[in-house]
């Protein structure tokens, strides 16, 4: 009967909480919050934009097999004095035809028009196009793997924040129970002091302990509120309190420990694997670039000038369209950068070093992840045993506290002894909460390393 006030107070608090939750709380399971987070997080949208960028790049490369058609039109005014001799035709250098015998007194400049359409169709690049497309495909794959890896990292980060909220909520519940216990001690000490069975100093000591318990309660309320604010980073539209799965959080089952190696399909490894394959394809591209290209060439041109066939020169604007001539040209062309035979070999050696570096990076990442996974599995096994022992210690400490409370009420012990056992109970309860939080944090780390969050989904709902 001595615990009846405490029991009734706890029931009232629970009923109040249920009523408040029914009006203000929202579902707070881990999977539900993940769904709310969706794919609108800025980091994810940035990675998605990268994927689309590389997809467009791949499509751009695919258009290289199409004929390249160039149109040129010009209308110019200038001299037309020709000269004999040889020169190197460099793009952008204008050309003047052979000498024209103009009539005495005729102008030395006139109007000219020129138009041309040129077609350059690379009918054979000896596999360069295919290898470039293959490399672009690996770039898309790497961007997709980057997205998956970022999503997994984001889920791990959100889960850590979510576990911190659960930890703060458990701490707040622990602080609430501690306030009720100390309040019961304060009321009991006051009654005994009024009856002359205990000194009045006991009341002051119990009041100090009560104020300290209330201060701890305020601290945990602040931590809980801050945790919910941090969670809104991932779910901005979240408002009101969350209906958290505290019972499942405090009654964790025995996790599966069969997983001892990281899968090759893990997003963190896939990023490096796609990069390795891209570097390999780049090496092949450089090898094909040393080969020539064969093109089908075709051209049409039309030219007009103000110089008549009889040598008369006309400077009118429209005269540039007179005396027209049209030509066409069709043929095959071969282009081969012979210097590239030497520079290409150096580039291939450089590319091989990049391949070796990417392969080493992949092997290092896999080794580190496997080692971390095995280490965290060992920690989880030990943590499960710690949680079980702490739970047993808590049960015995609760029984001891009830006995000491009865002995204090009967006047067999003093208040200092009762407060000491109450402090021990408080410490064991906090160790119990911290043990659960540490175990859940380790499970989150293991889920990130394995890429499998099914256990957390099934046990935090």
Image: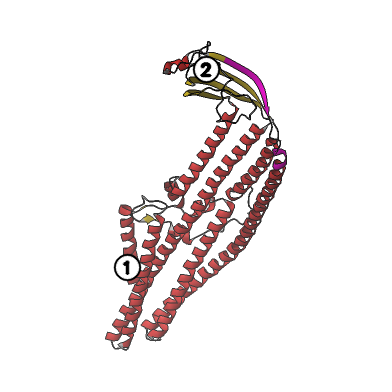
User: Viewer-proximal residue, 332 or 122?
Assistant: 332
User: Viewer-proximal residue, 151 or 323?
Assistant: 323
- Looking at the image, is 451 positioned above or below residue 175? above
Task: Please rate how many residues cluster around mark 2, counting C-alpha atoms within 10 Å: few if below 14, some from 14 to 19, many from 20.
Answer: many
**Which residue is the site of mark 1?**
9
Indicate the colouring scheme. secondary structure
Mark 2 vs 1, N-terminal side? 1
Which quarter of the image is occupied by the N terminus? bottom left
Estimate the x, y position of residue 433 in percent, counting from the top left: 47, 67
- Looking at the image, is 454 positioned above or below residue 135? below
Kindly identify the residue that appears in the image at 51 percent across and 20 percent down: 115
The answer to whether residue 182 shows anywhere in this view is yes
Q: Which residues are magenta?
A: 327-343
Q: Does residue 387 appear to the left or right of 129 in the view shown?
A: left
In this view, the residue farthest toward the top is 310
**Local SS, label 1:** helix
Q: How many marks?
A: 2
Estimate the x, y position of residue 217 in percent, counting from the top left: 36, 70
**Which residue is the site of mark 2?**
303
Kindly identify the residue that appears in the image at 55 percent across and 27 percent down: 94
Q: Is residue 292 covered in magenta?
A: no
Q: Does residue 299 appear to the left or right of 290 in the view shown?
A: left
């Amino acid at each position: 009967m001595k615990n009846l006030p405490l029991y009734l107070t706890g029931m009232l608090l629970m009923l109040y909480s249920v009523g408040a939750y029914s009006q203000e709380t929202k579902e707070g399971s881990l999977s539900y919050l993940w769904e709310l987070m969706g794919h609108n997080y800025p980091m994810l949208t940035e990675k998605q934009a990268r994927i689309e960028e590389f997809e467009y790049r791949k499509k751009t490369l695919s258009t290289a097999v199409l004929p390249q058609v160039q149109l040129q039109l010009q209308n110019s005014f200038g001299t037309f004095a020709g000269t004999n001799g040889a020169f190197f035709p460099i793009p952008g250098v204008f050309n003047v035809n052979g000498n024209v015998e103009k009539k005495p007194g005729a102008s030395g400049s006139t109007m000219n028009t020129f138009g041309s359409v040129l077609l350059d169709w690379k009918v054979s690049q000896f596999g360069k196009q295919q290898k470039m497309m293959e490399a672009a495909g690996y770039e898309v794959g790497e961007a997709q793997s980057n997205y998956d890896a970022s999503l997994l990292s984001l889920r791990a980060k959100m889960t850590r924040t979510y576990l911190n909220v659960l930890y703060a909520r458990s701490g707040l519940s622990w602080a609430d129970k501690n306030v009720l216990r100390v309040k019961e001690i304060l009321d009991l000490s006051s009654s005994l002091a009024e009856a002359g069975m205990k000194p009045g100093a006991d009341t002051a000591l119990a009041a100090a302990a009560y104020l300290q318990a209330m201060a701890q309660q305020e601290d945990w309320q602040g931590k809980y509120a801050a945790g919910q604010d941090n969670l809104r980073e991932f779910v901005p539209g979240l408002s009101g309190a969350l209906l958290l799965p505290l019972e499942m959080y405090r009654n964790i089952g025995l996790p599966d420990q069969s997983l001892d190696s990281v899968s090759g399909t893990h997003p963190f490894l896939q990023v490096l694997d796609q990069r390795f394959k891209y570097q390999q394809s780049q090496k092949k591209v450089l090898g094909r670039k040393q080969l020539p290209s064969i093109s089908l060439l075709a051209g049409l041109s039309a030219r007009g000038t103000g110089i008549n066939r009889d040598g008369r020169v006309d400077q009118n604007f429209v005269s540039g369209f007179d005396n027209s001539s049209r030509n066409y040209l069709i043929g095959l062309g071969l282009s081969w950068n012979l210097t590239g035979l030497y520079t290409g070999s150096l580039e291939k050696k450089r590319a091989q070093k990049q391949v070796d570096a990417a392969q080493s990076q992949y092997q290092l990442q896999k080794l580190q992840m496997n080692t971390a996974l095995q280490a965290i599995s060992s920690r989880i096994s030990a943590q499960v045993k710690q949680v079980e022992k702490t739970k047993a210690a808590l049960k015995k400490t609760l029984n001891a506290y009830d006995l000491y409370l009865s002995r204090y009420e009967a006047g067999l012990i003093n208040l200092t002894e009762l407060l000491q056992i109450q402090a021990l109970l408080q410490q064991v309860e906090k160790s119990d909460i911290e043990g659960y939080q540490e175990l859940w944090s380790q499970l989150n780390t293991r889920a990130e390393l394995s890429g499998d969050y099914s256990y957390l989904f099934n046990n935090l709902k």
